[in-house]
Image (cartoon, rainbow, N blue to C red):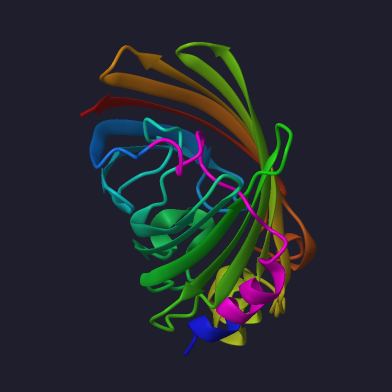
Amino acid sequence: MRLLPCLAILGILAPPLAWAAEPDASEDKPLKFEGAIGLVSSYGPEYGGAQKSAWRFRPGGFVRYGRLTISGAGGFTTRRDNDVERGVSAALVERETLRVSLSARWTNGRKSDDSDALAGMGDIQGTVLARLRVHWQPEGPWRYSLAVNTDVLGHGNGYVVDLGAARAWTLDDQTRLLFSTGASFGSDTYMQSWYGVTPEQAQRTGYAVYTPGNGMRDVNLDLTLRHEFGKHWGSFVGTGLSWQVGAAAQSPLVQRRLGWTVGAGLVWRF
């Protein structure tokens, strides 16, 4: 039942949207099976709004059969240059200007020992997030996206709505540069879990009590360079900025509103 409000929101906003993969799926039969195995490294804030940053190393990759994809860490694309959703995903619609996907993935939540600044805040439970995403590419270089993410287990993550815009430049046959920007909005449940401070937490941590309510969470800018080394090897390097805004920016947990990240990945395709 928690998914229904999110589907209702998407039902209102989705009709004007229409994006699809390159090239047109109706004209170029998609590969039945493909996959990738790789390693992703990144350096960024310990959590959204943290003062300190840390390195992270994760295995990455995906396996895709037809419209069904199973993926780990993000950052890689298919040979058809489609972004890969994390978790288990299915492409519901693939047209010249429209692509709609539904996915589900496990998220680990947040641990109080992820950062010294979170000591005494307690843990946010891991949960399964369902994600319904619409991509739209009208005439021109820009493509747009709308995604609704909801906590299907009710573990305090509520729902988050993501809006995005992106465009790519082809530098040569093997190299592409991608620029993207976006904004995120969180429900009151999500914002309270990740940015709020209850009276009990305030007693343990010394932070002021804070009840954020729903609203904007952040805006972001990302620049990614992707390069293919022949048929089987691919890579990416990228950097990004994330600016905590709205109710999130007023949280005592947000020690630095502007955070930056760098990341890279190497993948073997099959």
Taking the view exactly as shown, the residue that stands out farthest to the bottom is 1
- Residue 128: x and y, percent? 36, 71
| Residue at image point 70% right, 80% down | 211
Taking the view exactly as shown, the residue that stands out farthest to the top is 172
| Residue at image point 56% right, 44% down | 96
Q: Residue 217, relative to residue 31: is it above or below?
A: below
Q: Nearer the viewer, residue 40 or 64?
A: 64
- Residue 242: x and y, percent? 67, 44
Whether 13 is among the magenta residues is yes
Q: Quadrant of the C terminus?
A: top left
- Residue 31: x and y, percent? 29, 38
Q: Taking the image as drawn, is residue 189 in sight?
A: no
- Residue 22: x and y, percent? 51, 35
Q: Residue 111, relative to residue 208: is it above or below?
A: above
Q: Nearer the viewer, residue 29 or 55?
A: 29
The kind of secondary structure the magenta stretch mainly shows is loop
Taking the view exactly as shown, the residue that stands out farthest to the front is 27
Whether 144 is among the magenta residues is no
Magenta residue span: 6-28
| Residue at image point 50% right, 73% down | 150
Marker count (numbered): 0
Q: Residue 26, relative to residue 246: is it above or below?
A: above
Q: Residue 41, relative to residue 88: is it above or below?
A: above
Q: Nearer the viewer, residue 80 or 2?
A: 80
Q: Nearer the viewer, residue 178 or 119?
A: 178
Could you say which quadrant of the image residue 159 lies in?
Answer: bottom right
Could you say which quadrant of the image residue 267 lies in?
Answer: top left
Q: Taking the image as drawn, is residue 61 in sight?
A: yes
